[in-house]
Amino acid sequence: MSTTPIRLLLADDHPIVRAGLRAVLDAEPDFSVAGEAATAERAVELAASGGFDVVLMDLQFGVGMHGSAATAAITARPGAPRVLVLTTYDTDADILAAVEAGAAGYLLKDAPPQELAAAVRTAAAGQSALAPAVAHRLMDRMRTPAQALTRRELEVLQLVGDGLSNQQISKRLFLSQATVKSHLVHVYAKLGVESRTAAVAAAVARRLIRQQG
């Protein structure tokens, strides 16, 4: 068995979270926390410089780039480190965004230390590491594909939940307003609702999107 430690980069905007992760991970003999990043942009920069095997990536940073965008930027490079998302969010919108961005795994921050350590080793070995609850949600989507909201529909609905108008959503996502309306029509049909407010309420209740505020 190789004695070379798995080199880790911790990307989270909360110093206390990074310190806690470092304490847990440094306790593992085969891990080496080789760097920290307080922003997603810094994580991309450090990951590109080399020297890391796994990046533990938060999704929501205070300002700037989102964790999923950082994941996509990191994994797009040849020989990139594996990205393991570690977040408090377990909505379909967040999970799909991270997986499509190239994340090797998705864990929730309340995962016990042994589960986190196992996920890091799994990701470092080139395999997928999903929290049981996350795997369950993905399986549910696969079982009922006709009822599942698409990645774009979830993205539009999340922005509706954030309070954006159709015009604002069209500018944010570079879509026509007619396309935005079409996505919402499909969302209403799949959720069995007739209004924006009802769609957001239903989606939050089913943990499809995040609740704002």
Image (spheres, rainbow, N blue to C red):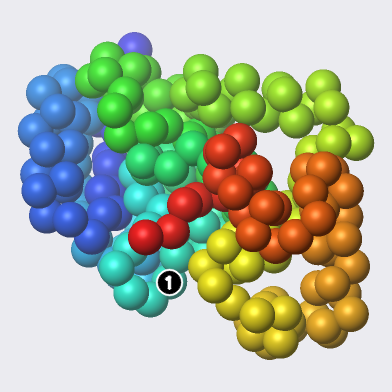
Left or right of 12 in this view: 131: right
Nearest the camera: 89 or 24?
89
Nearest the camera: 167 or 49?
167
Instruction: Decide if residue 25 is in sight here.
Output: yes
The residue positioned 38% from the left and 32% from the top of the image is 108
The residue positioned 12% from the left and 38% from the top of the image is 20
Whole-percent x and y of residue 185?
Answer: 87, 61
Left or right of 114 in this view: 90: right
Tag 1: residue type?
Answer: Met
Mark 1 element type: loop
Quarter holding the C terminus is bottom left
Identify the residue position indicated by label 1 in the image.
65
Nearest the camera: 42 or 172?
172
The residue positioned 28% from the left and 42% from the top of the image is 8
Whole-percent x and y of residue 91?
Answer: 54, 41
Corner quadrant of residue 4: top left
Quarter holding the N terminus is top left
The residue positioned 70% from the left and 62% from the top of the image is 196
Instruction: Decide if residue 54 is in sight here.
Output: no
Q: How crowded is mark 1: few (under 14 residues within 10 Å), some or many (20 or more)?
A: some
- Up the image or down, 19 lies above or below 126; here it is below
The number of callouts visible is 1
- Up the image or down, 209 lies above or below 213; here it is above
Whole-percent x and y of residue 15?
Answer: 11, 55
- Up the image or down, 159 lies above or below 154; here it is below
Left or right of 53 in this view: 69: right
Whole-percent x and y of residue 164?
Answer: 59, 77
Corner quadrant of residue 39: bottom left
